[in-house]
Image (spheres, helix red, strand yellow):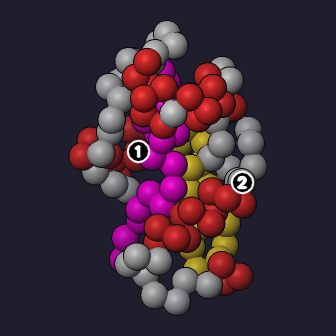
Amino acid sequence: MKDLNSNDLADALKHLSDFIDDLDPNNLEISNPTMISVYQLNDFDDINSWLDISPGELEQESEALNSFRGQSWATRAYNWKSPKDVPPIVIYVGDDYTTIADGRGRINYVLGRGWKNIPAVFIKRK
């Protein structure tokens, strides 16, 4: 399983800064990557409200993926041959709620491939 990419963490923190004040990246606990069920994602976010690719739509290479994030992203994604090849998504665990902070494209891809699990890291304040 892949480690968390620093760009993905930066994207997650940028997204979270829209609704969380004073989130200090030096004051975060970051879990090791772990596989979670894609069905568990609904516990953290209403993923059906933002999914762009239908489950199973990407069983074969598809124009849908190229138009979703562009050819460069699609080329990287098609190199992910199993869920363990996908970079982990980032889930923020707050005091009052938990939310998906980064990884919507990867979630779309995993569901589009019909896979049941996705790597994730959980971040929270120390």
Numbered marks: total: 2
Residue that label 1 marks: 40
Q: Which residues are magenta?
A: 93-115
What's under tag 1, amino acid-wise?
Gln
Return the mark for residue 32: none
Residue type, numbered disc 2: Asn
Query: Distance from label 2 to label 1 (Cα)?
Result: 22 Å
Q: Position of residue 21 (x, y in %)?
A: 45, 87
**8 left or right of 42 in image:** right
If the image is split into quadrants, where does the C terminus sit? bottom right
Quadrant containing the N terminus is top right
> What residue lies at 43% left-to-right and 81% top-to-bottom?
20
Magenta stretch: residue 95 in it?
Answer: yes
Q: On screen, 37 above or below 58?
A: below
Tell which of 110 and 41 is nearer to you. 110
Can residue 112 be seen from the camera position used here?
Answer: no
User: Is 7 part of what is drawn in magenta?
Assistant: no
In the displayed structure, 78 sits above or below 19; it is: above
Can you identify the residue that label 2 sits on?
5
Which residue is at the front of the view, 33 or 101?
Answer: 101
Q: What secondary structure is found at the residue carrying circle 1?
A: helix
